[in-house]
Image (cartoon, helix red, strand yellow):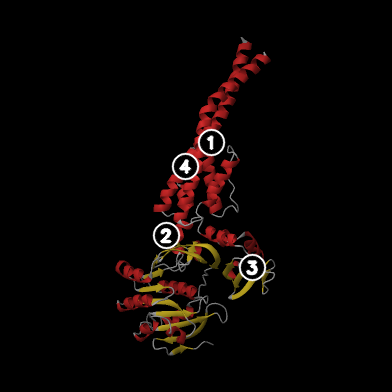
Amino acid sequence: MLDKILPEKIKTIISARLDYRRLYEIRLRAFMPVVINYDGKYYYLSEVGLCDETNIAVLLNSEEISEVLVRACEYSLYSVNNQLVNGFITVTGGVRVGVCGEIVRNGNEIKTIKNFTSVNIRIPHEVKGSALTAYSFVNDTALRSSLIVSPPGAGKTTVLRDLCRYISRDGIKNILLVDERNEIAAVTASRNQLDVGTSVDVISGCTKDYAFSYGIRSMRPDVIITDELTCEQDYLAVEECVAAGVKVIASAHASSPEELLLRAGFSKAFKMHVFERFVFLSSRRGPGTYENVYDGDMNCIYFAP
Amino acid sequence: MLALLLMFAFSFLGYLIGNRLALRLSDKRRYFEELISLIERLNGDFRFRQSSVCELINKQKFKSELLNRNLSEFCAFAQGETATLNLCSSNLNESERKCVFEMFSALGRYDLDTQLIILQDFKDKIEGFYQKAVVQENKMSGAYRKIGALCGLMIGILTV
């Protein structure tokens, strides 16, 4: 898919000098150097490959930035407008394209985004086995509601995807995958583009509170897996699921327990013991590096080496 | 007898050439007619179906070979199979070619409201081309056939 959306000059350099599998992120900003996250580290992209100097880095103009987005939605910007107003679109293969530009409002409602200034292309990775450590804590004596915590870009989604596959493999359980941004399973034309296991029902593109209540009613899941709890509403939806007897495995942004406690809605969920395991990840030794693991009372049960 | 046959054969050949030229005018008229119909359908589909342009376009089949060809060329471009938008535009003059190219280039690049306004603008322009093509066809297609037949006859007479 990247081949189809990237500008020719960037595509040529990446194909000739880099390995697509080690590429995590491509950040394109109008009239600014192109930045690449390669193996978890940021570099500028130049004609000769990766570099640390801005003066030789490749620049793109605003038209080229727009072209990337238009190509990403296969020349159908109007059809992804609902996603676009949330700041990103997800394209075939789970590639997430975040955008910045001029917001067009109609009263309080965001109508669309135009005159794009930045595009952030995040490439999903299937790292089979990446959730092995997490799985041993999430499913020790029984499956436990858990939160995978890390700063952005440290591999939460990859670990969640792999965790989903492990749970699916370990006896038949009904897993409801709430894929709000369509990047865990990357469903395209009713088919999962990324491997999330076999006994998984995927609901994508809707808010968590809706998906949770709808999913519990319609699919009777044993476990719900979802990405990025961001607001109080999300934590409330999780609380209701756990109260209904459904295990929830989710992810959240933070780099330490202290930071996590500052997140809106989390402290209440913590006091109510909604989660029984907190698995912290970082990019310290590349994306997906395991840090400490905590139990529901934030007692450390695994110290990172 | 042979001379008469030869004259008839040349005249018929001339008529066929004239007819071919007349058919080119009909093709052009049909191209614009169906392009307008495509824009009208897209207007509705963009509003209510929200599928990708290629998905909407692929389901449409037209009598105009040139239009069908343009649609597949656009889809190839939109799906990343070709790097640039190359549209076959034989039979179109410079301003028509430019308008059609701009119309296809503008497809799917805007939010819904803007897209509909832009398409309406192109539809108005293309309707102008269509009117011209109809007038041209009515005026010239009969004449091309007659001129063809007469020229054929003349060549036949000269040859005999």
Q: Tell which tag, 1 or 2, sits nearer the viewer.
A: 1
Q: Are marks 3 and 1 on the same chain?
A: no
- Chain letter, disc 4 residue: B
In the image, residue B18 above or below residue A12:
above
Q: Is any part of residue B88 visible from this angle?
A: no
Residue at mark 1? B28
Residue A9's image quarter? bottom right
Spatial CA distance of label 3 from label 1 is 49 Å
Specify the farthest residue to the bottom: A299
Residue at mark 3? A18
Q: Secondary structure at mark 4?
A: helix
- Chain letter, disc 3 residue: A
Tell me if A58 is positioned left or right of A297 in this view: right
Q: Earlier in the sequence, mark 4 or mark 1?
A: 1
Q: Are marks 4 and 2 on the same chain?
A: no
Residue at mark 4? B36
Query: Residue flagged by tag 3: what amino acid is it?
Result: Leu
Label 3: how many Cα within 10 Å (few below 14, some 14–19, many 20+): some
The front one of A143 and A46 is A46
Query: Residue flagged by tag 4: what amino acid is it?
Result: Ile
- Chain letter, disc 2 residue: A
Query: Residue flagged by tag 2: what amino acid is it?
Result: Ser
Percent across and percent down for residue A31 are: 62, 66
Label 2: how many Cα within 10 Å (few below 14, some 14–19, many 20+): few
Label 4: how many Cα within 10 Å (few below 14, some 14–19, many 20+): many
Label 1: how many Cα within 10 Å (few below 14, some 14–19, many 20+): many
Q: Are marks 3 and 2 on the same chain?
A: yes
Spatial CA distance of label 1 from label 2 is 41 Å
What mark, if any, has residue A190 been given in the picture?
2
